[in-house]
């Protein structure tokens, strides 16, 4: 999970913790789609850090991507972690446009 306000997320979702959540994310995702890559830092020979890609998705707008993936929603969620992460049908967007501006999800 990547969130804008992790304290708020932890208060609302007891299954989240510092081990499975990244934040406080201050960036924004494009309303026109883009590549999102989740990477984990790994020590390389003890002196360098490399980032190992764990997962990625290029989300878009229109077609099989939901209405709120082009802006105004508060989340883009993988429906089933065992599914093909690169297919739009395996992602859901949320129409929580009022919430996204108010509580930092």
Image: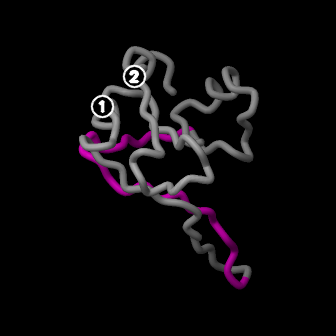
Residue 49 placement, left or right of 75: right
Position of 12 with respect to 24 (left or right) is right
Q: Is residue 37 a member of the stretch shown in magenta?
A: yes
Q: Position of residue 17 (x, y in %)?
A: 74, 38
What's the colour scheme?
A: one colour
Across and down, in percent, residue 89 comes to: 42, 45
Instruction: Give the residue pinned by disc 2.
Output: 95
The tag earlier along the polypeptide, 1 or 2, is: 1
Q: Nearer the viewer, residue 40 or 68?
A: 68
Q: Residue at x 69, y 74 (%)?
A: 43
Which SS class for mark 1? helix
Q: Are marks 1 and 2 in contact (CB under 8 Å)?
A: yes
Q: Is residue 65 above or below residue 7?
A: below
Please rate how many residues cluster around mark 2, counting C-alpha atoms within 10 Å: few if below 14, some from 14 to 19, many from 20.
some
Mark linked to residue 105 = none
Q: Which residue is located at x 62 percent, y 32 percent?
A: 6
The reply to whether the magenta stretch includes residue 77 is no
The picture places residue 12, in percent across and down from the top left corner, at: 67, 21
Q: Residue at x 58, y 41 (%)?
A: 23
Q: CA distance from mark 1 to mark 2?
A: 8 Å
> Foreground residue, 73 or 100?
73
> Which residue in the structure is indicated by mark 1?
67
84 with respect to 42 (left or right): left
Q: What residue sits 67% from the left and 71% below the top? A: 42
95 relative to 23 in the view: left or right: left
Magenta-drawn segment: 24-45
Q: Dot 1: few (<14), some (14–19), or many (≥20) neighbours within 10 Å?
A: some
Splitting the image into 4 quarters, where does residue 73 fall? top left
């Amino acid at each position: 999970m990547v969130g804008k306000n992790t304290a708020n997320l932890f208060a609302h979702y007891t299954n989240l913790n510092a081990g499975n959540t990244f934040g406080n994310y201050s960036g924004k995702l494009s309303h026109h789609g883009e590549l999102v890559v989740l990477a984990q830092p790994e020590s390389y020979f003890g002196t360098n850090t490399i980032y190992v890609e764990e997962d990625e998705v290029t989300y878009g707008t229109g077609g099989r991507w939901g209405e709120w993936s082009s802006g105004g929603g508060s989340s883009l969620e993988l429906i089933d972690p065992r599914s093909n992460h690169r297919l739009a049908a395996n992602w859901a967007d949320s129409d929580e446009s009022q919430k996204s501006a108010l509580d930092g999800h």
